[in-house]
Every structure is written in C-alpha cells, then in structure tokens.
C-alpha cells in the first residue's frame, strides 16, 4: 500500500517588470503570449500550452527533459480581475503520479511606469514528493522568461 | 471600484471521532451524510449539486435561512478512499468573490476511531472575510460531523 503523506508550504515571489499592468496581464491572458514564456527551461521542447482564460476555464501543459519524466500541469481558473488579479488551482503530475496540488494567486499593481507582480503559491505536496524549494526556483525561472518576453515585445 | 487585495492564510484543525475512517470518509462521499453537516451552525443549504470524484465539480448555495447569499464552487482534486480528500472551493456573497481555498482532509485510524486533520490554505479576497471567521465556520462543521456520525448509514459503501 502506498505511504500517504502531505506537506503544506507557502511561498511568495515579487518581481517588478518594465511593462504596465495591462501588458503583463495580457502575457497571462493571451495563449500565444503565454506560450512564449510559460514553459520549462531550454531543452524541454516546444510549448503545447492549452488555455481557456476565464473563470472555470482550464489550462494545461506538459513537457520535460529529454529521457526524463513528463511534467504535466493542469489548472482551473478560480478568480480573474482584469489587469489586477488571477487566482487558479493546479495539479502537477510526474508521469502518472500526482505530486502536488496548489492554489496560486498572482497580483498585478502599477509601480511607476511598470508593474509590481506578487505571486503567492499555497501548495500541498503529496506522498513524499516534497519539492517546495524546487517549485519556488521553477517559478523564478518562469518570471525571468516573462521579463525577457516583455522586453522583446 | 473595489479595492483589490488578497490575504493568504492557513487554518489547521484536528478532530478525533469514535467512528472508523470509512465512516468519516462517507461524511463527504455520501450525499445524505454530507447534507447533515456541510454548513456552519444553523445556516441552511438552499441548493446543492453533488459530484464527489476526482475532477468533479459541485455548487452549493447556502447561508442564513432568510438570506442564503453565499455560493461555493467546489472542485475535487485528489481523493484516496478512507484516507485523503483534497479539494478547492471558491466562495461568493451576492456574486462578489470572498475567497478561494485549497483544503486537505486527512483521515487516519486512531484505535477504534479516526483522527481527522484539516488544512485549509486560503486566499481571502478584497477584505471580505478573514482566517478567524473561516476557522470558526470550519470548526462548527467538523463538530457537526461528530454529532451526525453515529446515525449516518453507509449507504454507498459496504
């Protein structure tokens, strides 16, 4: 019988971007824009992001390192306030195993001509797949990719 | 225009029940058992759909008898029979968002009975609710589970 366990963790990442909230929000709301930055690191292959950006809508993406496990992301949008806030829940699978379920809140606030973004993740890691540090690092990488995407626009 | 905010909190509650884990699990899995406790205090459930399975979604409208102004949209994310339920729910009052929660219920055998651990990770939205208030509501519901367990038939599980 599988050993069942949970570990709950919360982290917050804050970043300032040079673009105004409407542009940063659009990088989340528009599937073509989001596919440009929301994916694994280099070498994980092309994004296959699917996005239905509305409350109750779903989002999914899968990928992984060559020869490694497939990381499968599956989200549902819970609350959307245009240019201000996005709340979603998502689950992560490694191959067939659900490793975590998370509540993610992204807040966008004007900061001069740019945007102060705060992302708070409240996660439960399941059955020993405890990787709060890796998760936070992963989002740090995503926000680096978002900053590069916004600069190139 | 509403001032937008999000306050994050985590609520933890523990209960010990005299019934075995399968019976406590049925308090969620069995529609009739669920109806007996799934609102705080003397509030009432005005409408409720039931879809207890991974990926299942439910909607409930509830509140004081003369003003059932709250809704909860629940999504079941992880279910391990008799052991664990992870679900999210978003709450509104008169169509204004109040909160989004990620709730973990863990059951383990405790002698002849059950130890229940509930962990609710919440984003309270726009100052509409707070952790102390939510904890009181959750505690009331967990107490009602304890009160309704002995009379609960296991209609869906042998």
Image: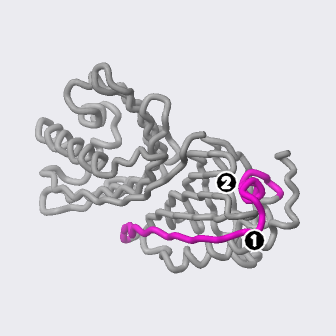
For residue B40, the mark is none
Q: Give B68 or B39, whichever is nearer the viewer.
A: B39
- The residue at 52%/64% (across/down) is B120
Q: Is residue A113 magenta?
A: no
Residue A5 position (above or below residue A53):
below
Q: What SS does tag 1 mark?
A: helix
Q: Give A124 or A153, whichever is nearer the viewer.
A: A124
- The residue at 78%/57% (across/down) is B23
For residue B59, the mark is 2
The residues tagged by marks 1 and 2 sit, at their Cα atoms, a distance apart of 24 Å
Visual colour scheme: one colour
Q: Residue A10 in the image: x percent, y percent?
A: 36, 60
Q: Is residue B1 visible?
A: no
Q: Residue A61 in the image: x percent, y percent?
A: 39, 31
Q: Is residue B12 magenta?
A: yes
Please identify the quarter of the rendering in which residue B71 is found: bottom right
Question: How busy is the neighbourhood of tag 2: few (under 14 within 10 Å), some, or many (20 plus)?
Answer: some
Q: What SS does tag 2 mark?
A: strand
Q: Chain of mark 1?
A: B
Q: Give B19 or B144, whichever is nearer the viewer.
A: B19
Residue B60 position (above or below residue A1):
below
Sequence-wise first label, 1 or 2: 2
Q: Residue A127 in the image: x percent, y percent?
A: 48, 46
Q: Give B50 or B27, whichever is nearer the viewer.
A: B27
Q: Nearer the viewer, mark 1 or mark 2?
A: 1
For residue B146, the mark is 1
Specify start and end residues of the magenta stretch as a single range. Answer: B3-32
Residue A4 position (above or below residue A14):
above
Classify the position of the C terminus of chain A by image quarter: top left
Callouts 1 and 2 in the same chain: yes
Please identify the quarter of the rendering in which residue B91 is found: bottom right
Left or right: residue A39 versus residue B22 is left
């Amino acid at each position: 019988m599988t050993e069942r366990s949970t570990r709950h963790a919360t982290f917050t990442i804050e970043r300032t971007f040079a673009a105004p909230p409407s542009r940063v929000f659009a990088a989340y709301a528009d599937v073509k824009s989001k596919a440009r930055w929301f994916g694994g690191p280099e070498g994980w292959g092309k994004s296959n992001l699917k996005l239905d950006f509305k409350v109750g809508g779903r989002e999914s993406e899968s990928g992984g390192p060559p020869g490694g496990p497939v990381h499968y992301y599956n989200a549902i949008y819970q609350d959307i306030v245009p240019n201000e806030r996005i709340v979603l829940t998502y689950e992560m699978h490694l191959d067939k195993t659900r490793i975590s379920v998370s509540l993610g809140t992204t807040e966008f606030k004007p900061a001069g001509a740019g945007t102060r973004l705060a992302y708070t993740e409240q996660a439960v890691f399941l059955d020993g797949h405890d990787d709060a540090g890796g998760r936070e690092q992963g989002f740090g990488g995503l926000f680096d990719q978002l900053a590069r995407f916004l600069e190139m626009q | 225009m509403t001032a937008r905010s999000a306050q994050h909190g985590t609520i933890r509650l523990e209960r010990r029940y005299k019934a075995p884990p399968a019976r406590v699990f049925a308090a969620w899995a069995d529609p009739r058992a669920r109806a007996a406790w799934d609102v705080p205090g003397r509030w009432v459930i005005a409408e409720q759909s039931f879809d207890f399975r991974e990926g299942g979604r439910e909607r409930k409208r509830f509140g004081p008898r003369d003003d059932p102004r709250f809704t909860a949209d629940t999504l079941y994310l992880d279910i391990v029979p008799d052991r664990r339920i992870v679900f999210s729910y978003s709450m509104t009052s008169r169509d204004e968002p109040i909160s989004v929660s990620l709730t973990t219920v863990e059951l383990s055998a405790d002698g002849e009975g059950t130890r229940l651990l509930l962990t609710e990770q919440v984003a309270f939205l726009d100052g509409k609710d707070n952790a102390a208030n939510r904890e009181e509501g959750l505690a009331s519901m967990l107490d009602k589970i304890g009160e309704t367990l002995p009379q609960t038939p296991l209609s869906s599980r042998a």
